[in-house]
Amino acid sequence: MKCVHTFLFFTAILAISCSEDETVISPPKDNLAYELEVAKKFAPLLVFDKEQGETSHRCFPMDAGWYFEVRKTFPYENGCEPECIIENMDYLSVFLGEIPTYYQYSACDEGEYVIYWWFYGYQCDCGWGSGEHPADWERIAVKIEKGELARVLYFQHGGQYTILADNSELQQLYGGHPVVFVGGTQHGSYHKTGGGGGMGACCYFEDWRKPGPYAEWKKMFTWENLVRLSLDEDSPEWMKCEGNGCWSYCCPGPMVRGIDLCDMISCIGYHSCTAGEAGGCLWSDVIEERF
């Protein structure tokens, strides 16, 4: 089958700072500027598989609002692939900070929480004739205690697990930004590399996460382009859309899922291809308590 890709080209060039982030955040305040300040300080560095953007349908995140507006004019119809696929195969758009990372913030009794979201226009077949669909929302969350990163919640394949900030396997760059390795086919988030890929990409830990040597990493500096999610009166239509077809009949948008950031679960097991293996709970530092 001939694969047709939609390439997104962007012209804006943003400066990227690689210096260590020494920002000191003042005590919580009830204002959006403070929320953005916190979101920037703890936003993750996304690291993609080395074949992302170079192999059929191994796409990068894209602008959800742009996708939403295009689908209003050209709605998705079942069975229309590959002609109607909308996806971003342009790594420069990611590296130069042109693709948004969406976020939500909440101050709770136990600390502060930020959840970060990315939108993909397409998710390809993971190898067993399953997992393929248009539109894909992915996320991670962080917990902040006394102004410091305390925990990271990684989501993937319908499961999730928690890594503590003092876990030696958790990589952090630029003064506390947690590193997230993105699955090459299913776009799940993990705290380390690995995955066999191929037909095994459907298994919980086996999605491709092989970025290659550090100097060759394909990176997304998410703090360069943060967009606050809200249900305010002046929020864009796509953030408030609740219909089944908002995201090509894939999944609900972030703001209509009813997520309580102060009451997230630290680990949800999702059985992988190995019988009895409880998915992310096998890796989770925290199991029987809230995130």
Image (spheres, grey):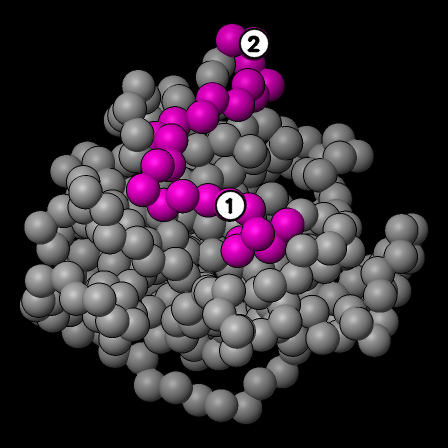
**Left or right side of 261 for 90:** right
> Within the magenta stretch, is there residue 253?
yes
Q: Quadrant of residue 29?
A: bottom left
Which label lies toward us, 2 or 1?
1
The residue labelled by disc 1 is: 258
- Label for residue 196? none
Residue furthest to the front in view is 233
Find residue 217 and report its image quarter.
bottom left
Up the image or down, 271 lies above or below 118; here it is above
Taking the spot 11% from the left edge, 70% from the top edge, the residue there is 23
Q: Which residue is mark 2?
A: 275
**Magenta residues, as a range?**
252-276
Give the amino acid type for the residue marked by disc 2 in the picture.
Ala
Q: Is residue 202 magenta?
A: no
Tag 1 or tag 2, which sits nearer the N-term?
A: 1
- Tally of numbered tags: 2
Asked if marks 2 and 1 touch (Cβ < 8 Å), the reply is no
- At mark 1, the secondary structure is loop
Count neighbours of disc 1 (C-alpha within 10 A) and say few if under 14, some if 14 to 19, many if 20 or more.
Answer: few
Secondary structure state at the residue bearing disc 2 = loop
Spot occupied by residue 196 in the image (x, y as percentages of width and height): 54, 33
Rendered position, 193 above or below 18: above
Left or right: residue 286 versus residue 217 is left
Query: 98 or 260: nearer the eye?
Result: 260
In the picture, the quarter occupied by the C terminus is top left
> Within 10 angstroms of label 2, few (less than 14), some, or many (20 or more) residues?
few
How far across and how far down the image is residue 69, in percent?
72, 75
